[in-house]
Amino acid sequence: MEIPYIFTPRKDTGMVNSKIAIWLFLASEVMLFGGFFSSYVYLRLGADYPWPERALPVLPGLINTFVLIASSVTVVFAWAGLKLRKWRMFQVNMSITIFCAAIFMVLKGIEYNVKFHHQAVRLDDYTILEGHLNYDKNTLDANGKEVGEDVIRVQAEKLTFSTMRYHAAWVEEILRQATEKGSKITLAEDVLIEGQSVTKGTELSVALLKRVCKNHLDSRGNNASVRTDALRDEWTTAKAKAENAGKRGWEIAPTIEINAEKIAPLLKKETSSLAFVVNPPLQLWFPHRDIKEGDAQSRLRDDTVIDGKLLDSPVNIHNLDAIDFRHLVMKAEEKGLDPIVAIENSWLIKNSEEAKAAWNWNKEQTAKLEKELLDNYGVDEKGVAKRVPTETERYRIGWKDFISKANGVDKGDAEIVISEEFFGPNYKLREAKHTFPHLKIPRKEVFLSGKFTPAWNTYYAIYFTMTFLHGLHVIGGAVVLGYYLFRGKKMYQSNPEWLANRVEVGGLFWHFVDLVWIFLFPILYLM
Amino acid sequence: MADSPELIKKSIKTYTLIGLVLFIFTGVTVAVATVPALDIGVHGFDAWDMILGLAIASFKATLVGYIFMHLNHEKKAIYWIFFGAIVFFAFMIILFMSAESDLIHYNGFRFGLPY
Amino acid sequence: MSAHAATADHSHHDDHGHHHEPGFLQKYVFSTDHKTIGIQYGITAMLFLLFGFYLMMVMRWSIAYPHEPLPGWMSWVFTDTWQARWLQDGKVTGDAYNMFGAMHGTIMVFLGVVPLGFGAFGNYVTPLQIGAVDMAFPKLNMVSYWVYLLGGLTMCASFFMESGAAKSGWTNYSPLAGFADGQIVNQWLAGQTQWLLGLVLLITSSLLGSVNFITTIINLRARGMTWMRLPFFVWAMLVTGFLLLLAFPPLEAAGIMQLVDRVFHSSFFMPSGLFTKSEGLAELSGGGSPLLFQHLFWFLGHPEVYVLLLPSIACVAEIIPVNTRRPMWGYKSMVYGVIVLGFLSFIVWAHHMYLTGMGPKISTWFQITTVLISVPSVILLTALMISLWGGSIRFTPAMIWACAFIPMFGIGGLTGLPLAFNLVDLHLHDTYYVIGHFHYVVAPGILFGLFGGVHHWYPKITGRYMSKTLNHLHFWPTLICMNFLFFPMLIQGMAGFHRRWYNGGDAYLAKAADSTNVFAKTVAEFIDLNIMMSWAAWLMALFQLPFIINLFFSMFRGKKVESDNPWNATTLEWATPTPPGHGNFTFDVASYRGPYEYSQPGADKDYTPQWEKPKVEAPTEAPATAPTADH
């Protein structure tokens, strides 16, 4: 048995199977990316925060566009090479295509990496700060790396674990921090496990928790089945009673009670929580997403309760890259407040001299720009200036502006090195002038903090999701094309048209990947 | 599709040319977005910049589809399908954008619950 | 132009038997034969259907008897620890109910009915009906099945995890679904996340499947099998394939975004200022839109309804002409109807969302399209109904199911009409009326059609008939129970019973006696129906046993078929040996006429098969060597 139309097109449809299949597959891909593009439009239209327009460095994106277009040209050259029966031409062009894919992914990796190394903070008054997190030299994590100062610190006196669930990695982390600082975490009261008593003072270990949890779950299971049987019996008796004849379930229900005394001997003891004393009290730190902090009691996401004082847990930023008031201004305008007053009343301006100076400098610069635009473009018939500074120019002070300020030049005139277009400011280069403010933000002023990950806002969420998915397509396409390059010789020798068909199909996919990027580049980098 | 060696050789020239055009228009799209002198509409980013950027992208995408993906050699029916899909998509987007203004926002019952 | 030049590729048939006999694994487990894969799909899907049915039985207990512990015959499958986690003194808790409800919907739709209709029947019958040797990409076909199984198991495995399975309804709306299982530290091991992973796998599977189906139908049709000679079944599969191909990816996009929401704490579907009782103000950036998820979900969700329906109506459309011994009434209008139906199904999705406050403009548009889509549906149903008229009907087991399909699906369809209208829907949304409506479509409608399909093609698959007696024992109680189960839902729904009450409305009863709460009184009036409906469901479970017995015992004990074409049918699948071997056809198959030529004037018997060469070689009857795509 052989499937027809693999090599030669069917007469009436004019296509081989794989060609139809790839077009169908691309139609499906169009719907997939269509879903994402539509979501982009929807999220952008519905955004209740200033959408970060032109927020990414353009240069890497531009290079990537060139790279991908070049690869699209070479992949059709490779196909043409096969059609002309020039194996060498195919080889060279296909190699270039795959090399281009590699360059694309490397650049993408660099872009991602830069985002994962920049910190962003949104204060409660919607001021947004961007910069670099300070790493605490005295606090090391499990891998021996310094911990970024964006964690919650608590003075733990008592730990209460839930016996329904615990996260072993966190328990080990707590133990590690305890050993490091010489604290002992011991059982607060005697507990009975499987008939054996574990005495007060036993040290915390994952094995102990595991035993307790298992015991608890077993007892619960036993008790559940005992109680279920008892309840079933109660219902059977209740239904048999004469006075309940014809009554409905909910009318009988209030009279039904499990006879506690009768089942008592069958029940096993449940341990619903397990408390440990920390002696001496221990400073613990947790990533802020994993802990719900309170002044006297905090709770981890796995329901572990930590009793103890909340310690000072500021977000410590060294080298502030940008101050962004656009969100604050948006919220102020929604409430009918004057944006300038709102900014000047913000926590940042009141508490940081450097920020205040930067803001005042920016105000001057905006005024200058406003005048320049008025001079150049004039006013319309109603007397309103035709062109005015943008929100970004008015309310965002970026790292290039800090450099301009330090260099004593106008906004936008700073000299930027090419590598800075990729990675942001080169601090070593600019250290002498102390261009970038340092800042410690108390935890109670912080609404949200983190790296530039999908969690930061919906723009970064859709940026990462779409580019990651596109990257997967690049890798997938490169793998397939690479297969034809390295394993295609056999196919070529047996039937050159076979490989040509395959490469055409692979090429169609590759062009589609290029096509998606042609749209992704402007909407994510330029708009 | 062009299957004879002469036609393939001829289309190689086309591909090179199209590649160049794509390069140039990539430059153009970045230039109009970043060089202040080329800014259209009001100062800074606005709807006109978006329309221009998307128009350039669509033009580039059409070239890729038409030449590189050999749509110029496909059947007429496919054009109608593409045309229909674009009209459908545009209609849906316009419908939703026009309806964005009359979203109903729920603010709770003014008179309390009935009981 | 000679017929042979055009089909040079067909000349490979005589490879038969030359290849070595494949081993057990290759033959039955990792098979690339479309028939084996179809049977694999069928068995897996039926097992999932059983599981989904069981979940529903537990839910029905909670609705009928919320105060009583689950009876032993239902709860024996649960381990003690499972009961300790999810039940309270053996009574179903809200969490457990939500879990069962979400998984019942998911399993029935994504793991049960679609694989049974599209995967099993589509795989087995389509290549046979178009006269192909196999699917266009047999290996892809195999991968498609295994990815489906993996996806299904991923979803169901979460029942045994600490988090339990997904609990946010089969629609998985954010922000509820975004938050659920937030206490699980490793989000990859939370039921709600596993649901999404399973879904992405299922979508991948159906994408591979639909590409394969459409390619097969376009390119692998036999000689002379022009578009208008395709049996309606194949047309329905083609449209279903396109629906799966184009409607699923937006849901995949939504699934990926929700996955990012859950694992990386983004806010695609999370609005600003979300506040929960346990967590307070959520530590999220906000700025997303829950409405976006609903749009993406229902962009799939509505075409999905037709993905469920079309394979079933396709089975019925095959069964009816065979058993009425007359041509299908309005074959062309059915074909055009199904194409229009497929197209319209893409532009009706937001009628599931009238209550979201998306605005009158969009609502108006979707009301119009929703009412429009009833036109092609009614065309299909009417054509099937008129096909019965004047036929000499043979009540074979398959025909009984097909005959029941028509009125049952009719009730399902007609009860949907009020829901199309914004104002009526505001009252009926999320009530049992909606549940009644779509269960009438899916259970007595779609499943009846598929049961019919099982009986119809069983002789081809096994070479034996299924038992008529057992079928009657299965059919009649099921029909009665179905109606006792779903009709009261319509009544309760109009009285305002909410679909997610885990205790069936019991919480209102305390208020009913002495309060001025009119609604509580209404609830008290109709709550007794719960008990009747639940018993109908459990009895129905009991009466599925004859079917299961029938399915397995007939394989060995059933009456043997007398010929390869036991129903005297006309379509190509009956031209194969019984059961069809690898490569399907033993002769150079071609189609010489339309698919439903029964009782043709001048013919010597009451059916003229597609593969039968015309007696008199009329010039126009020569098989079309170059069937055109735009016929």
Image: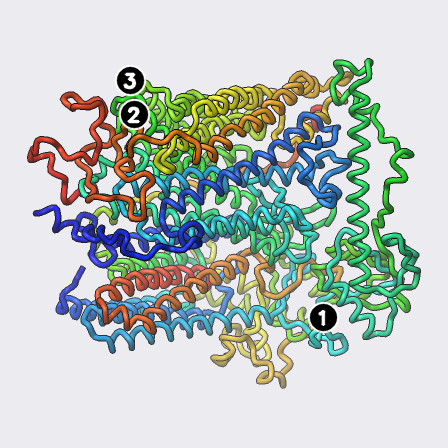
- Which one is earlier in the sequence, the residue at label 3 or at label 2? 2
Per the image, the residue denoted by label 1 is A149
Q: Report, in whole angstroms, how far the alpha carbon at label 1 lies from the one at label 3.
A: 82 Å
Where residue B58 appears, as percent x and y from the top left, is: 33, 57
Of the residues shown, which amino acid type is indicated by label 2? Pro
Q: In this rendering, would A323 be left or right of C600? A: right
The residue that appears at 7% across and 47% down in the rendered structure is C1
Task: Return the x and y of residue C574 as percentages of the image width and height.
Answer: 28, 35
Estimate how packed mark 3 is, as few (under 14), some (14 to 19) or many (20 or more) residues with alpha carbons within 10 Å. some
Answer above or below: position of A520 versus C32: below
The label number, if any, that marks residue C321 in the structure image: 2
Q: Which residue is mark 3?
A: C391
Is A41 rendered above or below residue C579? below
**Mark whose residue sits in front, 2 or 1:** 2
Q: Secondary structure at mark 2?
A: helix
When asked about the image quadrant of residue C520, the answer is: top right
Query: Residue type at mark 1?
Result: Glu
Look at the picture and state if C494 lies above or below A155.
Answer: above
Q: Secondary structure at mark 3?
A: loop
- Number of other residues with Cα within 10 Å of mark 2, as a class: few under 14, some 14 to 19, many 20 or more: many
Chain at tag 3: C
